[in-house]
Amino acid sequence: MRHSSSSLSGIFAVSVLSAAVSSAIHAQTPALQEIEEVIVRAHPLSAEGLAQPVAVLSGETLNRVVSPSLAETLRDIPGVHSSSFGQAVGRPVIRGLGGPRVKVMEDRIDSLDVSVSSPDHMTMVEPFTAESIEVLKGPSTLLYGSGASGGVVDVHTGRIPHEVPESLSGSLELRDSDNANQRTAAGRIDGGVGRLAFHFDGFYRNADEYEIPGFAESGGFRAREEEGGHDDDHGDEHDEDHDSHDDEHNDEAEAFGMLPNSQLRVQGGAFGATYVGDKGFFGFSIASYDAEYGLPGHSHSHHHDEDEHDDHDDEELHDEDHDEDHDDEGAEGGSILDLAQTRFDLEAGMEDPLAGLRAINFRLGYNDYEHIEFEGSGEAGTVFATEALEARLEFTHHELFGFEGATGFQLSNREFSAIGEEAFVQPVDTQTLGLFWVGQRNLGSLGLEAGLRYENVEQNPTQGATRDFDLGSASLGLIQPLNDSWTLSGQVDYSSRAPVAEELFSDGPHLATQTFEIGDPSLNEETAANLSAMLRYQFGTLDLSLSAYVSEFDDFIYEASTGLEMDELPVLQWTQTDATISGIEADASWQAMSWQGGTLTFNAGFDSVRARLDSNANRNLPRIPPQRWRLGAIADWNGLVAELSWRRIDDQDDIGVGELPTEGFDDLRLHLGYTLDAWGSPVQLFISGRNLTDDEQRYHTSFIKDLAPQPGRTIEAGLQMRF
């Protein structure tokens, strides 16, 4: 295993934070509470209200739902799902769209990792150190470019402070889970001296293989294996067939009760500092991230050595410390992904810099990332590396031609390479330049939003011709209060997306998806006409919203089956056709009771999405989430909080070619917390239970849903201290 001096930063930072908490515990802050005013920092018009659907997690709500993966943290937001790849990996899926159509950001700059390249690659943002997480549902290409045609998830860390705090503050959180013996520690310190503000944070998480209610393989997958017909079922977009080895499979002990090779270890930390002047600020941060985790559900040795099929011999792997050399893990080990990242960020802002301008803001992020995928034998396999930079400059202006808004430009450069036996895409350099404007004005009671963007994307492979794309996007939104309680909003968008390197230049076995992928260097840009509407009712403590949307795609990019096999894997070809995606979402919250020191609130949610290729009315897109229902209640009284929630995920029978149906499941959760005063600071003790009915849970959005279910019943306890 690789080690660098930065790999220990997470442990060191958490240790420093623990010591600081004990020595600075007398610093006073108010008790834990929710942030009442919601400000969407990912959008410059947020202060005026948005026609685009937005969800924000912060404060106590975020503390209750935070999970190891970003997408699992967002699980209760209507329209947001997870492309889970074990407990370590989960990229958000928004309204049925994921991968390169959803942009994951950290403080308004792209995560700059390789999570778009493959579903088994971790998103390099840490939910446990987030101040808030914002989700912009629907096209967000105006502000953030081609990679945001499905939506945006922005994680705000506060690593670059914008003002000097009046006193030293911080937090420390410790968690311990019975399932997989998962232990988490995270902490932060924020302070300042004179005009200088500073920030420290650190985190550490370790987990063994996790327990599951039954077999790792789904009943449908095992039945297909037994019938011996799965060779005929390789279809377009389906990534579940995890080896052509029927004879060996029948002789192997099937994984039961534990998901092999699902362990993880994650650690990291960050330091930030800002100089704050009378009218502006300038700050920077540097962060490191180090992780090692197993890749459940597939074997990397399959296609080049048929004598080493070890898919189901992994059940006793990696319970030992992962700091041991990979060469000692033996041929029976599962595939391991070992990564390291260093990220550097800059931000500067100024208020009222010139006549007509309200503010100027500059952001820059630079990331140096590398991971090695180790074979079960401990040998180094494929090396993925990226060196990426993104910068944006925004000018927020006063009223101009009746509109207040923001204009600016965004540029990025990404040098990506994948080297090794299983490198399915050649090295590619990608450059983008975008110019944008968004504005808002009121016409009586009617709120009007508009925006335009031009973007150029250039893809430069090491072999083959350079591709150059000129993209345009436009948006028009309306917000109309109908009376004191009802508000109607709607938005029309035209968005365009350039194909990513993997869609253009893939040519090789992709073992994470169990396919042989072939790109198409002649792909055109993908465009979509989008229409969305939302009706909202607010009266007293009752808040209801209903949203509907439809997107008509031209030249939708997807993987189609060729009916061929190569290296014993089904061959999929990236291609284009028209597609339609539509859906509805509902959300409700009602504070039913309030009394001195306490409240009782009920909430509910629903979402449903359909996605079809227009070239064939019976052809569903793959990995589209099923209908989902949510009911919950939360009560708090004099420091005691109790939350009970139930989610019903329906069966998914509207499947793509080659997919298996996915059975629905229930998810019952309970959270209990009590906040007490310790040495003048609030300390919250909590215990929570997830999947309390121990249901077999499989996310249809997951590439390995038939090979790797979600964890079984899990009980977690912990404490959070703030000062």
Image (cartoon, rainbow, N blue to C red):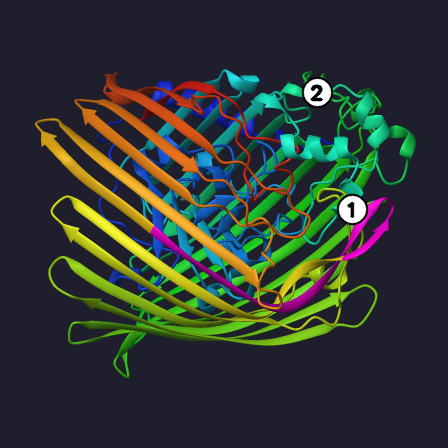
Q: To which residue does mark 2 refer?
A: 318
What is the crowding at mark 1: few (fewer than 14 residues within 10 Å), some, or many (at least 20)? Answer: few
Q: Is residue 470 left or right of residue 691?
A: right
- Front residue of 522/677: it is 522
Q: What is the quadrant of the C terminus in the image?
A: top left
Q: Earlier in the sequence, mark 1 or mark 2?
A: 1
Residue 97 on the magenta span: no
Element class at badge 1 = helix
Q: In the rendered image, which quarter is residue 76 located in?
A: top left
Residue 184 % position (x, y)? 49, 24
Counting from the top left corner in percent of width and height, residue 583 is at 42, 57
Residue 644 % position (x, y): 31, 27
Describe residue 488's horizontal placement relative to residue 528 as left or right.
Answer: left
Residue type (three-letter) at the residue carrying disc 1: Asp
Residue drawn 26% across the image and 23% down it = 682
Amino acid marked by disc 2: His
What number is the disc on residue 26? none
Whether residue 210 can be seen here? no
Q: Quadrant of the N terminus?
A: top right
Q: Which residues are magenta?
A: 562-585
The quarter holding residue 60 reads top left
Mark 1 — residue? 232
